[in-house]
Image (cartoon, rainbow, N blue to C red):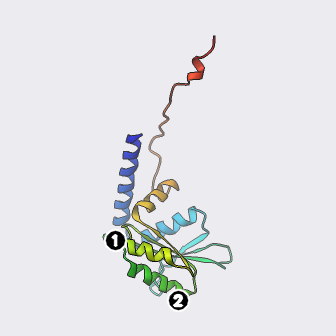
Amino acid sequence: MEQVKEIEGELIENIIEYLNKAHWRRLETIVVELLTTMGYGDGEVTGKTNDGGFDGIIKEDRLGLDNIYVQAKRWGKPVGSPDVQGFAGALIGKGARKGIFITTSSFTKSARDFADKLESMKIILIDGTQLAKLMIENNIGVSSKKKLIIKEVDFSYFEGE
């Protein structure tokens, strides 16, 4: 099992590396595709310069009565609370109650604390490691190389006369 964890860890590192090398528009597309695949609704990449700071919108229902706004950042340094506060402000400007802030790096403790304390809206923070794990779970950007079945002795088979 230790080898499996090692392989998974290497895969996560590789995905994060490729996400950091990907064009910023591609990162936005990947994030929206992931959230759509996870079943959150129909997604679209905003792709506009006047998008209010959002990189994508997920319409939770077909009519778009409830939207989730997405921001994706490819950064080398941890995302701090001022950035999450800015995202919250952009959500308020839209009258939105739900947002997902995704980064290929990590979030500072103060950024996580800020997001956790919000009452009028919900902001989910997804760091690079969690993003890579979600991509693996949902088969986004990965393919099966080889399936491995680990067998053990069926002790009951050898019992009896």
Quadrant of image for the C terminus? top right
155 up-or-down from 140: above or below:
above
Residue 149's disc number: none
Name the element at disc 2: helix
Tell me how many marks there are.
2
Image coordinates of residue 72 in percent, x first then y, are 44, 73
Q: Identify which residue is drawn at 66% across, 79% down.
A: 65
Judge from the rendering whether residue 157 lies leftward or rightward of residue 7; answer left or right: right
27 up-or-down from 92: above or below:
above
Say if residue 51 shows up in the picture. Answer: no
Disc 1 crowd, CA 10 A, few/some/many (<14, 14-19, 20+): some
135 up-or-down from 96: above or below:
above
Alpha carbon separation for disc pair 1 and 2: 25 Å
Labels 1 and 2 touching (C-beta < 8 A): no
Image coordinates of residue 55 in percent, x first then y, are 47, 77
Which residue matches tag 2?
93
- Which tag, 1 or 2, sits closer to the chain's start? 1
15 or 107, which is in the foreground? 107
Disc 2 crowd, CA 10 A, few/some/many (<14, 14-19, 20+): few
Instruction: Indicate the amino acid at tag 2.
Output: Gly
Instruction: Indicate the amino acid at tag 1.
Output: Pro
Image coordinates of residue 113 in percent, x first then y, are 44, 74
Q: Identify which residue is drawn at 51% across, 54% down.
A: 137
118 or 90, which is in the foreground? 118
Which residue matches tag 1?
78
Image coordinates of residue 49 in percent, x first then y, are 44, 85
Q: Identify which residue is drawn at 57% across, 71% down.
A: 43
Name the element at disc 1: loop
